[in-house]
Image (cartoon, helix red, strand yellow):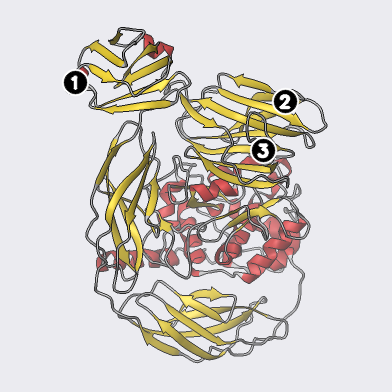
């Protein structure tokens, strides 16, 4: 561990040396407003290289590693990081990349802070690491393509406090995303970077309620005001500085608003001359210290205009910013002496003298937690395995649990349950869990559990909307999870019905997030409610308009759209083409990607035979070659629903006993072969 820490610190030091050349910002002196913005656009565009969308994952270990909070080498994720305590879960670089998800902590992917749907997923924007961060897949999906703003009544709140819901920011009433305070300035500076580098392209981008369509200011007025506030409240952090230096190595350009945060006001703000320093913070007190953190408070400074934030120093080195006169400094090493002081800063960059210094030594904890017990399997799907366990105990506190799949660390969580996603179908996995405390002491491993993910059937999605949020006539954003798939709906209500409960869309959309195993054909039932006309929903797959539609009118209609045929993990959106018609949607289902699904072609090529067929006595008799090599057999009804699974089906005989299946048509899938049979 010491060797790894030394290497990491050495690597970080090398990144801090990779700063901008002295001449990088030549030509900016004396410029303000639009002129400065245009000059910066030319500077940060010249020489920038495009490493490709897949290349982002290669850059993230240098740009987005947690060396500042837990300091554990995990992925630094704005949507799961808890800056004042243990993260609710975390990811290791290169492991648990999305992939499919249904819950937080399942996997991480690439979050375009400016959504790629705004610019049609075109290069170089789609792979520009300066505004694309690794984040939890579930929260990324919930954020969708909403702009950033203030949320009061959240429709969704992540485990670290990131919120999605109706905007309460002045000038905008649509749905927005509000990150935690720790990352509001980071997001603001990324967006200011985007509208600066790509200012000449903005006229061809979609606004999304966020971007302007002219080079200056490049943002809608309300969004600009939100971002100006956030940039001032959350100043540049050490993590941003390291990220900017690493991005320069990776992509050969820089975010100027991290190097010169004062340029944000120079370009977009109201110019105020302020040369007066804040007063000195006083009465700094070390209230408590643990193995890995320290809590500090002090008497606030005063300023002629206002104190913007405080800089916190640890052993003489800038460690973090605080917008208040209280802070928890995390990421400390146990059994180590530390000195702390703070400095006040105003928005113009004037700083106070340093406060008094306080000292303390972090506690030592060498006692490992007990092993987690009773590790148990929950539901097993084609791409996921749910697990739960009994909590471990510790002399201080259990901080987190590491989950291992086939001996490989897949991620961590603070819960005693998890959904391990992004797995392969028809694959056997062995899982165990290890408890850790804040000092890094690890428990013995729990018991192991083994499960085999299911094979892919006919249908990959089947949503009847019975589990949507409680009945409400209010048009809003709603989020829910059903059958292992996360859903979100915008400008929608939940109180209408068709065949049962239904989701009603007005000027918005319905999206199934990160659905595994692709899509072949899509079936949807629609019914226009209240007054209006006829119309259609556009079908988008992975933010791309398929050119196909779902119709609606005053009478109930069920439509099947064939030939969508997109493989892999898909995001399926139905977007109302009307801004006024209120249309209920029910019984939305889709088949798997045709290359994966069990279909008539694969059935006809089966190398085994079922007899008698039709089946009459609740037994399937099978003849064929190499039956004893088949590890698992599955039975699907003809809608594609899995109704029975049999492990080692032909180990002792060539007979399968059916479990009280009703009359109908079924498909037996055994190994790579399938056959149809009928129960009379």
Reading the image, the residue beneath label 3 is: 509
Point out which mark residue 628 bears. 1
Residue drawn at the location 63% of the way across and 40% of the way down: 117
Binning the other alpha carbons within 10 Å of mark 1 as few (below 14), some (14 to 19) or many (20 upward) gives some
1 or 3: tag closer to the N-terminus? 3
1 or 2: tag closer to the N-terminus? 2
Q: Are marks 1 and 2 in contact (CB under 8 Å)?
A: no
Of helix, strand and loop, which one carries label 2?
Answer: strand
| Figure quadrant of residue 190 | bottom right
Q: Nearer the viewer, residue 204 or 29?
A: 204
Q: Nearer the viewer, residue 416 or 128?
A: 416
Q: Position of residue 589 (x, y in %)?
A: 55, 27
Point out which mark residue 552 bears. 2
Residue drawn at the location 63% of the way across and 46% of the way down: 470
Q: Is any atom of residue 484 visible in this view? A: yes
Q: CA distance from mark 1 to mark 3?
A: 49 Å
Residue drawn at the location 39% of the way across and 68% of the way down: 13
Q: Position of residue 656 (x, y in %)?
A: 27, 19
Q: CA distance from mark 2 to mark 3?
A: 14 Å
Q: Position of residue 135 (x, y in %)?
A: 49, 52
Instruction: Look at the picture and state if 35 lies above or below 455.
Output: below
């Amino acid at each position: 561990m010491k060797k790894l820490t030394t290497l990491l610190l050495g690597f970080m030091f090398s990144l801090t040396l990779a700063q901008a050349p002295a001449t990088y910002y030549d030509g900016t002196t004396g410029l303000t407003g639009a002129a400065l913005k245009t000059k910066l656009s030319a500077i940060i565009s010249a020489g920038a290289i495009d490493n490709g969308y897949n290349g982002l994952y290669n850059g993230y270990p240098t740009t987005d590693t947690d060396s500042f909070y837990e300091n554990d080498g995990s992925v630094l994720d704005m949507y799961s990081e808890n800056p004042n305590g243990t993260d609710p879960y975390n990811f290791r670089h290169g492991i648990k990349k999305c992939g499919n998800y249904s819950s937080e902590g399942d996997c991480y992917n690439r979050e375009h802070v400016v959504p790629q749907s705004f610019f049609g997923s075109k290069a170089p924007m789609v792979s520009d690491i300066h505004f694309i961060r690794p984040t939890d897949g579930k929260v990324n999906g919930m954020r969708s393509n909403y702009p950033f703003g203030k949320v009061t009544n959240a429709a969704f709140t992540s485990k670290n406090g990131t919120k999605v819901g109706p905007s309460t920011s002045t000038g905008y009433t649509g749905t927005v995303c509000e990150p935690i305070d720790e990352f509001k300035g980071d997001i603001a500076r990324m967006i200011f970077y985007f509208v600066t580098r790509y200012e000449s392209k903005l006229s061809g981008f979609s606004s999304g309620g966020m971007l302007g369509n002219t080079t200056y200011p490049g943002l809608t007025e309300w969004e600009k005001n939100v971002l100006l506030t956030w940039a001032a409240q959350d100043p540049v952090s050490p993590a941003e500085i390291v990220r900017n230096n690493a991005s320069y190595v990776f992509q050969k350009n820089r975010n100027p608003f991290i190097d010169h945060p004062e340029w944000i006001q120079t370009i977009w703000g109201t110019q105020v001359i302020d040369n007066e320093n804040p007063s000195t913070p006083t009465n700094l007190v070390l209230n408590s210290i643990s193995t890995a953190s320290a809590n500090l408070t002090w008497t606030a400074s005063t300023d002629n205009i206002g104190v913007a934030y405080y800089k916190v120093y640890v052993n003489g080195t800038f460690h973090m910013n605080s917008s208040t006169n209280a802070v928890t400094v995390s990421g400390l090493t146990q059994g180590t002496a530390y000195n702390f002081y703070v400095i006040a800063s105003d928005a113009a960059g004037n700083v106070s003298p340093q406060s008094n210094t306080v000292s303390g030594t972090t506690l030592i904890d060498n006692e490992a937690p007990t092993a987690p017990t009773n590790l148990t399997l929950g539901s097993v799907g084609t791409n996921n395995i749910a697990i739960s366990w009994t909590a471990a105990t510790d002399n201080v506190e259990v901080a987190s649990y590491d989950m291992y799949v086939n001996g490989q660390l897949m991620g961590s969580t603070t819960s005693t349950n998890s959904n391990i996603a992004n797995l392969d179908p028809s694959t056997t996995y062995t899982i165990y869990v290890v408890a850790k405390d804040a000092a890094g002491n690890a428990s013995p491993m729990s018991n192991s559990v083994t499960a085999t993910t299911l094979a892919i059937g006919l249908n990959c999605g089947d949503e009847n909307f019975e589990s949507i949020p409680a009945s409400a006539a209010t048009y809003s954003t709603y989020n829910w999870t059903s059958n292992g798939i996360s859903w979100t709906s915008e400008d929608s209500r939940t109180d209408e019905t068709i065949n049962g409960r239904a989701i009603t869309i007005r000027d918005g959309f319905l999206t199934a997030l990160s659905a595994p195993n692709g899509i072949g054909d899509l079936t949807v039932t629609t019914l226009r409610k209240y007054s209006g006309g006829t119309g259609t929903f556009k079908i988008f797959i992975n933010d791309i308009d398929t050119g196909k539609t779902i119709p609606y009118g005053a009478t109930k209609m069920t439509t099947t759209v064939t030939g969508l045929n997109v493989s892999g993990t898909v995001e399926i959106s139905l977007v109302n083409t009307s801004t006024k018609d209120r249309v209920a949607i029910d019984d939305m289902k889709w088949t798997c990607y045709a290359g994966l699904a069990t279909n008539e072609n694969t059935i006809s090529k089966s190398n085994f035979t079922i007899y008698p067929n039709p089946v009459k006595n609740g037994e399937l008799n099978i003849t064929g070659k190499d039956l004893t090599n088949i590890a698992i057999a599955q039975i699907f009804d003809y809608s594609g629903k899995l109704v029975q699974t049999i492990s080692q089906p032909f180990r002792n005989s060539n007979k399968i006993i059916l479990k009280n299946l009703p009359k109908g048509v079924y498909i037996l899938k055994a190994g790579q072969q399938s056959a149809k049979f009928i129960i009379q």
